[in-house]
Image (tube, rainbow, N blue to C red):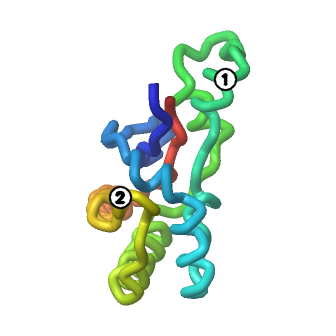
Amino acid sequence: MSTVLWANRLIDGAVTSDQSDKYAMHKHLSKIDEIARGAGLMALSEICDTTDLRFNIEDLSLPEGMASTSEWMAAQGVWVDAAAAASQLAALIDAIETRKPRFGLIRNDYEAVVAELRESLAFAREAAGQAAKFNFAIVM
């Protein structure tokens, strides 16, 4: 089982996920954060929610009346305005494409990181059009 990121939007208390495994983004999150900070942007990890991860690792029980970790994340999770997230993601992609850093020692995951960021940007822009909140969930 791998740990990945999923992009999510929150509208009227309901979470919708793109359910697309962003393995490269999770794997290289520290480097992505370094690039973001160097460009004067918010670190990507600041909009990563750990609700699902904590429930899986710590074997926690959901509060009574909740059927999924998505419900808990909707109520207690890390969220940002989707328009702000889209703006940050677009600027981050620009910074990465300008620098063209290597992602990985043995295999360069540059193309995978950029593709996953672009996919996330599209999802964030769609969410912004719906006045939604946005985050990345760390899921396993």
Q: Position of residue 78 (x, y in %)?
A: 63, 49
Q: In this orientation, which residue lies closer to the viewer: 136 or 58? A: 58
x 52%, y 63%: residue = 81
Res 57 label: 1
Give the secondary structure at mark 1: helix
Residue found at the far front of this picture: 106
Quadrant (top left, top right, bottom left, bottom right) of the N terminus: top left
x 42%, y 78%: residue = 101
Res 107 label: 2
Instruction: Name the front one of labels 2 and 1.
Output: 2
Residue 56: quarter of image: top right
Decide if residue 119 is on the left or right side of residue 32: left
Circle 2 crowding by C-alpha within 10 Å: few under 14, some 14–19, many from 20: few
Q: Position of residue 13 (x, y in %)?
A: 51, 38
- Amino acid at pointer 1: Ile
Q: Position of residue 112 (x, y in %)?
A: 30, 58
Residue 130 appears anywhere in the view: no
- Amino acid at pointer 2: Arg
x 68%, y 38%: residue = 76
- N-term mark: 2 or 1: 1
